[in-house]
Structure formats: C-alpha cells, structure tokens
C-alpha cells in the first residue's frame, strides 16, 4: 500500500482513536526474520567476514555489502535538538469529561466517549542528549494529540512561566545557560558564570528563577510533576467568540520533588532515573495519569487580572481564576523504538486545530517561527511530517511536493491550486467556511520595536511565589540559590543577583547573600542598573496554595519503591505481612541484601533477593523497611553499606520503619526500642520503630503506608548532622 494511503483513517466518530494511531504505526513496523538481507533485499550468506584478497589479504573495494553496512552505521545519528535534547516519551490517550462546546469548537474536546491518541515527550531543557535526568532544570511537557481534525501540539513545561518576555532574547538565554564555549563546561546545569551574568542583567527572569531554584526543578518523577502551556492561548467557539485560556496538567500521583543531595547522587548512580521510572511504571500496568485543566478568561476582561495576560513571565493565580478539570490524559504504552518515535517526533506550537488559536504573547509568536527550522535540519528535510510518529490519523492532502526522503507518491499532473485538471471541475480553496479560521482580531497599532509598559513589573509575582511557599520550601530555595551562586567565580555577578532578589524579599536576599563573600543586598543598587523597571502591579492575592508542593491534599503509595533490608536470619513473618499490605496499596517492594540469590530466614526458608547494597543505593527508593531478626540485624549493623543506606535515607527525609531487632541499624542516629515503649514509636517524623509483639494486626502497615504517602518528612530533626 503506498505511504500516501497509509495515513488515511476514517475521520468520523471513533470511540477508540488510540487504536487508529497504533495500527498506523504497526504498518511501518519491522520485526525479526529468519534471514539476513541487504537494504535492497539481497540475502546475505556471511555477516562475520568482509571480502578479502586471500584469507590474510586486504579488504576489497568491491565488497558492496560491507560498504552498505558501514555507510549506514556512519549516518545513524541525527543532530540532537538544540533545546530539550534529553527526552523520554510514551503513547496514550486523552478523553474529555464533557463537551467544551461553549468555549471551543475543537472536536477532541467535545465527546466524553471519544479517546484521542496522544504521544507525550518529557525532557530537560538544558542538557545534551546523553546528560543526566535529575539535574536542576526546567522540564519539557509536550503532548501531540492525533485528532480527527489534524495533529494538535501542546508544547509546554513543568513550570507555568518562562525566563524571558520576548523571543528576541531566546538565543541569548540558551547561549548563556549552555556549557561555556571556551571549554565546553559545565554540562546540564545553570550553576556557572555566563548564565547568572545574563539573568542578573535581565530582571524579567526573576520570577522564573524562583521556580527553577525550587524543588519543581528536581521532580521525583515525570509522573509526579505538573505541566503547563505557559502562554495564553485562545478558545474559539462555533460563533467565533474568543476566550483566553491557560492549560494545566495535574498529575494524579501528586506533585513531588527530590532532595538536592539525592538528585545529585542519582545523576551519578543512574543517569536514566526518570526515563527508567516512566518505562517501568507503564510496563507494570501502573499507567501515569493527569487531568487537563483550564483557566478561562473572557476576552475583554483580561485587564481585570491586574497584569498583562500576554506576559509569559506571569501566571494566573489559581486563587484568582480556578482551574477547571476538563479531561484526562493516560499514558499506557511505551514506544517500540526509541529513535523512530521519541527521537524523531517533531512538536510545534503552531500545530493547531479549529477552535484553538494563538494570543499575541511575543514569546509564543517567536516560537511559531522557530520550531520548523530545527526539525528540517534535524530530520533531514521538509518531509519530516511523513515520519510515522508525526503522521496525522485524519486524511491529509495538499500540493506540497518533492524534497529529501519524500515518501508519498502523488499521482497526476496537478501540483497547484486552483486547478481544473485534477478532477475535471474547478478546485479552489479561497475563503471557505470550513477548516481552520484565524481569530478576527482588530489591529490598530503602529509598528514598534519596544516592550509594552504593562510588561514592566518583574518582581510582584516572584514575591507571590515566595510568599506561597512553606518554610521548608523556602529553605530549599535559599539553599539552591546559594549552591548555584557559589559556583559563580565573578563576585560582581553574585552581588547583582542578590540585589535583584532584594526586590522580591529582603530577608530572602540576605539569607542567600550570607555565605557568598559579598556585601549585603542593596535594592537601590539594583534600581540604578539598566534593565530595571520601577513598576509594580497591585496583586489581588498575597499567596496561593497551588504554588507550593508541600502540604497538598491527597497522596498515596502507588508505584512508590520500598527497600526491604535483609540478611540471613531475618524474621519473615512480619516482613511478609507488611510486604503484602504495601503491594496491595500499589507500592513496589524490593529485597536488598548483601548478595544476590537467596538468604535464609530465621525459620530456614529461602527468600529471593532483588538487589544488593552495591548495585541499588537508597536514592533509588522512597522508603525503607528493616525487618526483625537478631542475626539479620546484627549482620547489617556491621556493614558500612547497609548503615550508609539507612543514614542516607534518613538524610533525604524518607520514611523508615524498623521492626524489633531491626532498630540496630538506627543506633547511629540514637534511636532504640525501649522496654516500655509504645507499640509504634515515632521519635522523629517519618521514623517508625515497632515492637511486633505489641502492634495490633494491620496497624503497623497502616501507619507505614500513611507515612510513605506524605512523600518526605522535611521537618525531621538533625538532618544536617548526618554524614551520609
């Protein structure tokens, strides 16, 4: 079947659109075969030896099989993305909760019975394709909807704002944050002079800096981070009415981050941590899920927000305009081939469907220009839309022709419009009522190359974000600023940053400056520098709980990883009960021991081991269970790796449960099981010491699960004193 026919799928009502995309991709799939051939289909008799002039002679130029194989290998890599090179992706579907016909005519947002296939790619922004997953960075959250009206790409981030207000500064931003060009270091981090030099001279970056210095920049999992469309878009209904809209993705597993020390260690222990986490969750049937929510603002009422809705460094507080859930996104299938799908997928914010349109956000407008050129360069030409992962599932027809790697075989002599030769009647597309209609927006201004004064407030929402954080989140932000700026060699740059922060909160700036060997923050000095704008909006709210991560309602232990530390002589009865309760609650339990194979329990049974302390450190887990058994606990207490495992988990504020003799591993922390202690003793948040003889059936499991569901216990005592 010609490729031009393969992408034609019935555009009518289909309640399981995900099957359409899957079957389309399968038509391009290739599996194993009983024979080996060249790319031309010639069967190969020997794939181990090149053609030589005698057994020990030189290789012959006529060996076309060798030449083809080597030539193909030499061209297997394509240029990586200029931004967001490091990525992971999955297939799934989107399903609306109800019709949004009041606001938009977009077909995929109308019928709750229709599933629209999607392909979602998560990424870091800064690092190269081979960099680590857990660096401090903005995460990309790009969703390609294969709708009945064409592909729609919602290309966003895990933060609702961005560094800059105008696309003119995007190349400068990326050049500043990349490894410094004279020596190519550091990789995948903003902790260096050129980045902070740039942002210290651009006060508009301040709000985004607050987000990137928060735990949002080191998510526990792609499955546990929010996504945002960042810009204001438009919903257009069938009458042509326009409403401004901001898009939100809300994860069902909650919003959680790593500890900074933990994130750095994971980067060294498992650079693929987030990629592996996503893959394993989907493979095990624990499908990640998000709700799509929208903030809708009537056109004409956007001025009532108190700030300019077109400014991408501003967000709409949820306390001011609540997020309306309108549908769910489920990722239920991993790619069959990383390169063919994850690497070759091409997103573009200009891929729209009827019922959705752009706003005049100047950063968005620049992105509309930017995305096509890298795809052409990266994917070998203008026909990248014909790559299977990029093909729409609806019919596609136009008069674009030829180009490198063209797959469609367009029949006939007509390659233009209007025409009469294609079908014997005039074919003309000239102002029809069907198809995409750009919003009719009156434009009465003169051309001007300058910024709107309504964009001049650079600090009010940064202050809103700061004021909305819990005490521990504020501590983490201060620590992040200190770490990053301590890597900056030029003291004048460090000084400019804290002077700017003084306009967010003077106490914040003073805390950041304290260990950096510079003067106290001086807000007047910042005010006197070029680029500073002495303008403040009057915020309608002082804080917004939606901007913090700690203390959100809900939470469960689904897909949380629990390490069970054992050695020969472990008491298995209590272990098995708790392990089963954890699995029933959706957690993933792994047995960690001094060696692989099996260990012997106190009753003489064999217990299979999943990991050793050497190959699976504590940073790979969310919680730790230390069962009883004097011999087991005694062995582990003498192992530096086991003691370090527990101390490190404690330092990272993870839930730890020790049963009976298992408390020996906590002796370094000064914890013990007293003779008169209660059934479950909690000496500090998230540490449970249990006397199995006193605990009622099921209580320990219940308490342990409830503690894990809180994610981390950031208010734990003496964390800074732990040497792990």
Image (spheres, rainbow, N blue to C red):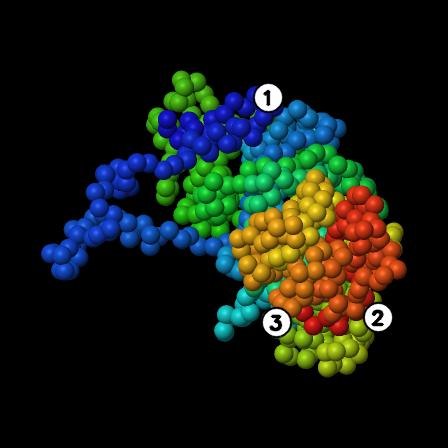
Residue occupying the far left of the picture: 54
Per the model, the C-alpha gap separating discs 1 and 2 is 58 Å
> In the image, is residue 16 above or below residue 680?
above
Q: Residues within 10 Å of mark 1 (few under 14, many from 20)?
A: few
Q: Quadrant of residue 665?
A: bottom right
Q: Nearer the viewer, residue 11 or 443?
A: 11
Element type where label 3 sits in the image: loop
Q: Position of residue 225 (x, y in %)?
A: 68, 49
* Contact flag, marks 1 and 2 (Cβ < 8 Å): no
Tell me the residue at 45%/21% (across/down): 426
* Disc 3 target residue: 192
Q: Quadrant of residue 420?
A: top left
Q: Nearer the viewer, residue 2 or 21?
A: 21
Q: Position of residue 8 (x, y in %)?
A: 47, 26
Q: Nearer the viewer, residue 38 or 714?
A: 714
Q: Residues within 10 Å of mark 2 (few under 14, many from 20)?
A: few
Per the model, the C-alpha gap separating discs 3 and 1 is 53 Å
Residue 507's mark? 2
Tell me the residue at 51%/31% (across/down): 21
* Disc 1 target residue: 13
Element type where label 2 sits in the image: helix
Q: Quadrant of the C terminus?
A: bottom right
* Contact flag, marks 3 and 1 (Cβ < 8 Å): no
- Can residue 570 be seen at all in this image of the molecule? yes
């Amino acid at each position: 079947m010609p490729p031009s026919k393969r992408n034609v799928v019935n555009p009518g009502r289909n309640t399981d659109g995900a099957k359409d995309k899957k079957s389309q991709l399968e038509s391009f799939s290739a599996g194993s075969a009983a024979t080996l051939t060249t790319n031309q289909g010639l069967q190969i008799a020997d794939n181990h030896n090149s053609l030589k002039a005698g057994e020990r002679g030189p290789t012959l130029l006529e060996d076309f099989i060798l030449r083809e194989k080597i030539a193909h290998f030499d061209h297997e890599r394509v240029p990586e993305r200029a931004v967001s090179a490091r990525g992971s992706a999955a297939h799934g579907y989107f399903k609306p909760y109800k019709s949004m016909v009041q606001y938009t005519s977009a077909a995929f947002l109308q019928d709750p019975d229709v599933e629209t296939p999607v392909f979602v790619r998560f990424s870091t922004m800064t690092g190269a394709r081979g960099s680590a997953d857990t660096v401090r960075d903005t995460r990309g959250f790009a969703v390609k909807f294969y709708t009945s009206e064409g592909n729609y790409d919602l290309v966003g981030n895990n933060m609702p704002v961005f560094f800059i207000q105008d696309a003119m500064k995007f190349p400068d931003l990326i050049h500043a944050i990349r490894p410094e060009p004279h020596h190519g270091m550091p990789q995948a981090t903003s902790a260096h002079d050129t980045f902070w030099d740039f942002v210290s001279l651009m006060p508009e970056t301040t709000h985004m800096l607050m987000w990137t210095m928060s735990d949002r920049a080191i998510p526990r999992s792609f499955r546990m981070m929010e996504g945002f469309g960042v810009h204001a878009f438009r919903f257009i209904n069938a009458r042509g009415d326009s409403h401004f809209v901001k898009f939100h993705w809300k994860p069902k597993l909650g919003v959680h981050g790593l500890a900074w020390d933990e994130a750095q260690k994971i980067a060294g222990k498992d650079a693929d941590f987030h990629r592996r986490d996503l893959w394993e969750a989907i493979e095990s049937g624990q499908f990640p899920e998000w709700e799509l929510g929208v903030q809708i603002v009537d056109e004409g009422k956007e001025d009532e927000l108190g700030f300019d809705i077109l400014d991408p460094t501003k967000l709409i507080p949820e306390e001011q305009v609540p997020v309306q859930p309108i549908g769910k996104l489920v990722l239920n299938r991993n790619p069959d081939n990383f390169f063919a799908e994850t690497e070759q997928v091409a997103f573009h914010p200009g891929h729209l469907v009827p019922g959705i349109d752009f706003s005049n956000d100047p950063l968005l407008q620049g992105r509309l220009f930017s995305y096509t050129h890298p795809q052409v360069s990266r994917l070998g030409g203008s026909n990248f839309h014909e790559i299977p992962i990029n093909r729409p599932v609806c019919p596609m027809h136009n008069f674009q022709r030829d180009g490198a790697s063209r797959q469609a075989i367009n029949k006939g002599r007509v390659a233009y419009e209007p025409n009469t030769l294609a079908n014997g009647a005039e074919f003309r597309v000239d102002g029809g009522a069907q198809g995409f209609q750009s919003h009719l927006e009156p434009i009465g201004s003169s051309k001007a190359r300058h910024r709107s004064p309504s964009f001049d407030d650079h600090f009010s929402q940064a202050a809103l974000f700061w004021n909305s954080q819990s005490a521990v989140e504020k501590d983490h932000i201060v620590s992040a600023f200190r770490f990053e700026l301590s890597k900056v060699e030029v003291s004048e740059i460090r000084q400019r940053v804290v002077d700017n922060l003084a306009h967010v909160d003077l106490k914040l700036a003073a805390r950041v400056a304290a260990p950096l060997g510079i003067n106290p923050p001086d807000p007047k000095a910042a005010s006197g520098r070029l680029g500073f704008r002495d303008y403040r909006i009057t915020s309608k709210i002082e804080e917004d709980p939606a901007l913090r991560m700690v203390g959100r309602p809900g939470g469960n232990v689904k897909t949380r990883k629990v390490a069970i530390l054992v050695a020969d002589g472990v008491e298995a009865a209590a272990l098995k009960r708790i392990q089963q309760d954890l699995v029933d609650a959706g957690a993933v339990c792994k047995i960690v021991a001094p060696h692989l194979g099996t260990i012997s329990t106190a009753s003489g049974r064999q217990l299979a081991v999943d990991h050793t302390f050497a190959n699976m450190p504590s940073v790979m887990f969310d919680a730790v269970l230390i069962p009883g058994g004097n011999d087991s606990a005694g062995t582990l207490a003498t192992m530096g790796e086991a003691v370090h495992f527990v101390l490190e988990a404690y330092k990272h504020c993870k839930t730890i449960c020790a049963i009976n003799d298992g408390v020996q591993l906590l002796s370094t922390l000064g914890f013990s099981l007293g003779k008169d202690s209660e059934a479950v003793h909690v000496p500090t948040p998230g540490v449970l010491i249990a006397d199995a003889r006193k605990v009622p059936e099921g209580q320990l499991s219940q308490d342990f699960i409830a503690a894990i569901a809180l994610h981390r216990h950031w208010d734990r005592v003496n964390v800074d004193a732990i040497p792990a």
